[in-house]
Amino acid sequence: MSNSQELTNTLIDTLKNHTYYYAAKSAAKETAVKLILNNQFNATTTPSSSGGKKSNPRTSSTSNHVQPPQNMFEATKTSIEDLSLKIPIRNLIFRLALDEKKSFCSFDPIPQVEAARKVWCGSINSEIRAVAVERGEPIVRKLSEGEGGENSSSGGEPTPPITTPTPATPKNKSKIRFIFDSDDLLDAIKHIDPTNNSKSNHPNVGQIKLKISTPSMINLRETFAELHPTYMQIGVDDFLNDSSRFIAHRLNLGNKVIGEGYVPIARQYAKFGIPASLRSKIYRTAMGLSAEFTNKERSHYDGLRELVEKVTYPITDELFRMDVENVSNDFTYFPFVEVLTGVVMSFSRDPWLLDNADVVTHEPLIFKNEVTGDKMNVPSSGVHPFKRLVNFAAPLSFVYQDEEHLYYTFRSLYASFFCRLNVIDSREGFLIHLCKTFEDLLLSNSPSLYAHLLSIKVHPLQVAFTWIHFAFSTFLDIEQVLLLWDRIIGFDSLQLLPILSVSIFLFKSEMLLCCTDLDGVKVVLGDGSRLKVVPLLQSFLFLNELKVD
């Protein structure tokens, strides 16, 4: 056996007491170990120039090749502890285990949904091209190094050519329109052909006609067991009299979690809510980022801002900025418009999302520079602008003071969670499945309310879709949004969105039963500023836990 293989096996043995280790396949484990070994182990065994460490007796003085020590197990274990690599290695294995658990494929298992997704993405790209022609604007304009004018461009597969409209002078500089909004997305979903062979617990009386299996109340109670009222929660118990000891305990524990830097521990902590003063660092830790902002992150963000200045996308850039302008009309976010503009524009330029998001949100347009031959995705992130995209980032402006810090947490949350809310996809945890879960849960828990709403020609999903689509960021008070996001991160699940939606309908059921039309329903459910997330989740999941499904 080679020395490198022996070293790899030894490190694997060192980590075998780690729970999440067993969730990863052998190939994934070995990959993780080799990454650590290649980057770190030589540094632990090579003598320091200052003479602070003794030379390895097995290392040749005439060779740069480092031989592993005789006691491989102890030496590897010591090296990990000396360089504080234990947590990074465990976090890496945890991430690999999560990736393997998700095991996302590139297409939807229901052919009708996959076909609808392709039509949806194609229509977005066609609309952007149509707006470009209408306004006489290019898709891409490079401004660096005095190049100024419009680059000639040609299309590359899989999209048709992207060309500069002619004549070059703008035809129509009227206010640009959003390419699509939440209503358009719902309309596309509810018109999907329902002829598939999956199982369903309920008849198809809702707007999601697809037959999709959704979780039962028993499943949900098991999944979200830590939300049970017997556990103390930030968002409930911190507002009670004599809560100082509880708050002090959570703060003390939270600081230890931050110091530990271990992703699963941070997520477990988040299940019970995060004190506002610790949320910024707990979010970073739970999303796999270091608690403190790094120079590498700063350098990457500076590069994104430079790209915004050097290369503009006239159509999509204007749409991204218009979205921020719209949210500026909300006095809550008005002070953060400049920060949110920087975040959204940098987000549009970040190719990291194409490779790291759970799913690519849209099919980017392909721009080819005929001079260099380089291809460019437009937008680089693979996320086209749509109305209220900025609302996924806006609540974080109350968590982070610096634009760069806000950006990386937003990017991580979008890549792990919010991207699933913006695609036509029926897989578990994605938008269609969440909408179907909402409809099934409401029907099974209050068939009389569901029937009444249908009788007045109101589909419950008409109202709840925007809540689910934007993770309640457009509906609830900011602190309640963040308390909900604490639990989404902690449980690594978006199922809380349909659960909370159903709970709100049930909470307002008496008034809803008195409504006679959609306008009345919108009045009853139009204001979420007084709603409290944690009590609503607890009441739905556990108030009737002895009830037989």
Image (cartoon, rainbow, N blue to C red):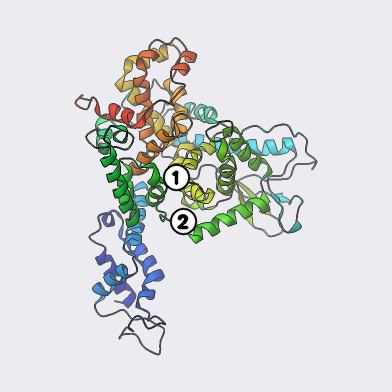
Local secondary structure at mark 2: loop
Q: Position of residue 45 (x, y in %)?
A: 35, 78
Residue at the outermost bottom position: 62
- Quadrant of residue 498 within the rendered picture: top left
| Quadrant where the image shows the C terminus | top left
Residue topped by disc 1: 413
Give the residue displayed 42% in from the left and 47% down from the top: 280
Q: Which mark is residue 314?
A: none
Identity, as a three-letter code, of the amino acid under mark 2: Phe
Tell me if mark 2 has few (under 14), some (14-19) or many (20+) residues whose alpha carbon lies within 10 angstroms of its own.
some
Cα separation, mark 2 vs mark 1, equals 16 Å
Q: Which mark is residue 293?
A: 2
- Quadrant of residue 226 within the rendered picture: top left
Identity, as a three-letter code, of the amino acid under mark 1: Leu
Image position of 279 with respect to 306: above or below: above
Left or right: 226 with respect to 415?
Answer: left
Left or right: 302 with respect to 400?
Answer: right
Q: Position of residue 139 (x, y in %)?
A: 68, 45
Local secondary structure at mark 1: helix
Q: Position of residue 71 (x, y in %)?
A: 24, 77
Q: Which comes sooner in the sequence, label 2 or label 1?
A: 2
| Quadrant where the image shows the N terminus | bottom left
Residue sitting nearer the eye, 377 or 44: 44
Left or right: 190 with respect to 498?
Answer: right
Q: Are marks 2 and 1 in contact (CB under 8 Å)?
A: no
